[in-house]
Image (cartoon, rainbow, N blue to C red):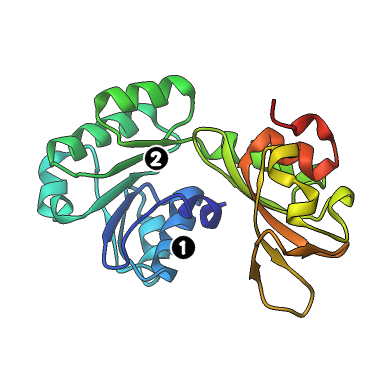
Amino acid sequence: MGRIFSEQFAFSASDSIVVIGMGRFGGAVAQSLMRLGHDVMGIDRKEELVQFWGDRLTHAVQADSTNESTMLQLGVADFSHAIVAIGSDLAASLMTLMVLTELGIKDIWVKAMSPEHGQIAQRIGAHHVIFPEADMGERVAHLITGRLMDFIEFEDGFAIAKINAPADTHDQTLAEAHVRSRHGVTVVGVKRLNEDFQHALPETRILPADVLIVSGPTRKIELFASGTRRAKQR
């Protein structure tokens, strides 16, 4: 789960990140960010979690993240980004967010446990709010149908997905299949077994075993992948 959601964080390679709340989600995201080359400080009140992550992160500190003086002493104000991953204590999550806001952190992400939590976090000063359980549930629902092999959905309902080539595109070029005009989606590229990925061109011919990378509204991608023509633009 952490790996999937860490993909949402558009950080530069040199950025330093503080992750507050080293439970399952926070720990997984912190570990993924370390693998991507970031300096990561993990903060949690629980000694056992700090000990576990001590040799896995750049720094791991046992501290009360709701205490502004403590956070200032830890140098949190110098970090480029902060992720509040506290999932079991609403008050602690919001108080930590207030501290980060006071310290002037310019990019704050908050894990929200409910829509209400997310709304309050945004009003207090969160720049990004994520709903891991809800997002994961939606992702699984899309994948479990078998139509989408993988996908990333953005906030406005636009998605990029990997799908098996639908039957009505087989043995045709993209120009002949009229994918964009008929289905409202764009084929970005084609991956063929034992061949390199190729960017899609109008003359690219689609074979039955091809895997397509497509972009467009999520619902239209699902319809295209299922072979349903209701995705046609009107």
Name the residue type under label 1: Ser
Q: Is the residue 119 above or below the residue 20 in the image? A: above
Q: Quadrant of the C terminus?
A: top right
Say what secondary structure mark 2 lies in.
loop
Residue at figure coordinates x 80%, y 56% from the top left: 164
Position of residue 145 measured from the top left corner of the image (x, y, whole percent): 82, 42
Position of residue 220 in the picture relative to residue 39 (left or right): right
Q: Nearer the viewer, residue 158 or 141?
A: 158
Q: Residue furthest bottom?
A: 194
Position of residue 18 measured from the top left corner of the image (x, y, whole percent): 28, 54
Name the residue type under label 2: Ile
Between tags 2 and 1, which lies in front?
A: 1
Q: Which residue is mark 2?
A: 86
Determine which of the numbered discs, if any, sits on residue 32 in the image. Answer: 1
Label pair 2/1, CB-CB below 8 angstroms:
no
**Residue 57 is drawn in which quadrant?**
bottom left
Say what secondary structure mark 1 lies in.
helix
Position of residue 179 measured from the top left corner of the image (x, y, whole percent): 74, 46
Q: Is the residue 187 above or below the residue 229 in the image? A: below
Q: Nearer the viewer, residue 233 or 161?
A: 233
Q: How many marks?
A: 2
Q: Nearer the viewer, residue 213 or 78?
A: 213
Residue at figure coordinates x 25%, y 30% from the top left: 125
Position of residue 147 in the picture relative to residue 40 (left or right): right
Position of residue 131 in the picture relative to residue 160 (left or right): left
